Image (spheres, helix red, strand yellow):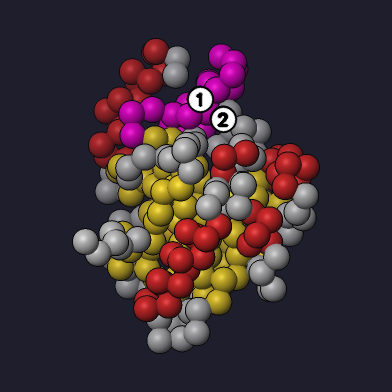
Amino acid sequence: MPAESSLIYDLPAVTLRRITVSEMGNNVYLLTAKKSGVQLLIDAADEPEAIRSMIAEAAADTPCSPVLRAVLTTHQHWDHIRALPEFAAVPGVELAAGYDDATAIESETEVSIDRRLTHEDTVSYDGISLEVIHLRGHTPGSVAFVYPVEDGPTHIFTGDSLFPGGVGKTVSDEDFRRLIDDVETRLFGQFPDDTVVHPGHGDPTTLGAERPQLAHWRERGW
C-alpha cells in the first residue's frame, strides 16, 4: 500500500504537512510557501529522518527550490525539541521560541535560539507570516502560532496548551488558572469558531467544537 501523505491542507498561499513521531505521538508541522519555496517547521520533536522525508515531499508543493528558513518551537518540553539540534545545523535556518522558554531549550539542546518571541510578535518569512500568542501555564514561555487565511479559516498551532477536550497539563492551580484564562481570552476571545486548532499531540479540532466545554474545563480544574 502507498504511504499515507503528510499533506493535510492545500491552502491558497501555502501547504501544510504533518507527521507524528516518537513514542509520545508528537505532531511536527511544515508550512511551505508556494510562490517562494520558503518552509517553516513547527516543533522539531524527534525522528529527524522522518522530518527530512516530509520536507522532501513538500518539494512537490512549489515550483521553486524549497528552502527551510526557520524552526519554531511551541514550548520547552523535551519531547518537542529532540530533533532541534539536527535542524539548527542547516545553513541559514533561524530558531525561534517563546522568550520565557528559550533559555531552557538552549540548556537542553545546546543550540542557540535566534529569536525570543513575546506576545503579539510576528514571525515573517518570504510568503509566510505568523502571529505569536503567549499562552502561559503549561510552561512559562509556551506560545501558539497563528496563520490567517484570506477568505478561509485561520489555523493555530497550539503546542500543548490546547487540545481537543481540554487545555494542557499544569503543575499548580495557579498555572491552570493562568492557562485557562489565556486560552479563553487570547484564543476563544479573539478568533471565530471555524478556526482550526493544530495541537502538539493528537488530531486537529476547531474552536467552535471546543467552545461549549470552556466552563466545564474551568470547573473541573484541568
Question: Which residue occupies the foreground of this view, 186 or 101?
Answer: 101
Q: Is residue 31 left or right of residue 48?
A: left
Residue at 53% x, 52% y is: 47
Q: How crowded is mark 1: few (under 14 residues within 10 Å), some or many (20 or more)?
A: some
Looking at the rendering, which quadrant does residue 187 occupy?
A: top left
Give yes or no for residue 92 being in the magenta stretch: no
Looking at the rendering, which quadrant does residue 3 occupy?
A: bottom left
Which residue type carries mark 2?
A: His
Q: Position of residue 88 (x, y in %)?
A: 68, 61
Compute the Cα span from label 2 to label 1.
Answer: 6 Å
The number of numbered discs placed on residues in the rendered structure image is: 2
Quarter holding the N terminus is bottom left
Question: Which residue occupies the foreground of this view, 18 or 38?
Answer: 18
Which residue in the protein does label 2 denote? 138
Q: What secondary structure is marked by label 1?
A: loop
Question: Which residue occupies the foreground of this view, 38 or 137?
Answer: 38
Can residue 60 be seen here? The reply is yes
Q: Is residue 57 left or right of residue 41?
A: left
Q: Which of marks 2 and 1 is nearer the N terminus?
A: 2
197 shown above or below 8: above
Residue at 39% x, 56% y is: 18
**Mark 2–mark 1 CB contact (< 8 Å):** yes
Q: What secondary structure is marked by label 2?
A: loop
Residue segment shown in magenta = 164-191
Which residue in the protein does label 1 denote? 169
Q: Which residue lies furthest to the front in this view?
A: 1
Q: Where is residue 35 in the image (x, y as percent from the top left)?
A: 43, 82
Give yes or no for residue 175 being in the magenta stretch: yes
Quarter holding the C terminus is top left
Q: Where is residue 175 in the image (x, y as percent from the top left)?
A: 59, 22
Question: Which residue occupies the foreground of this view, 29 or 198?
Answer: 29
Which residue type carries mark 1?
A: Lys
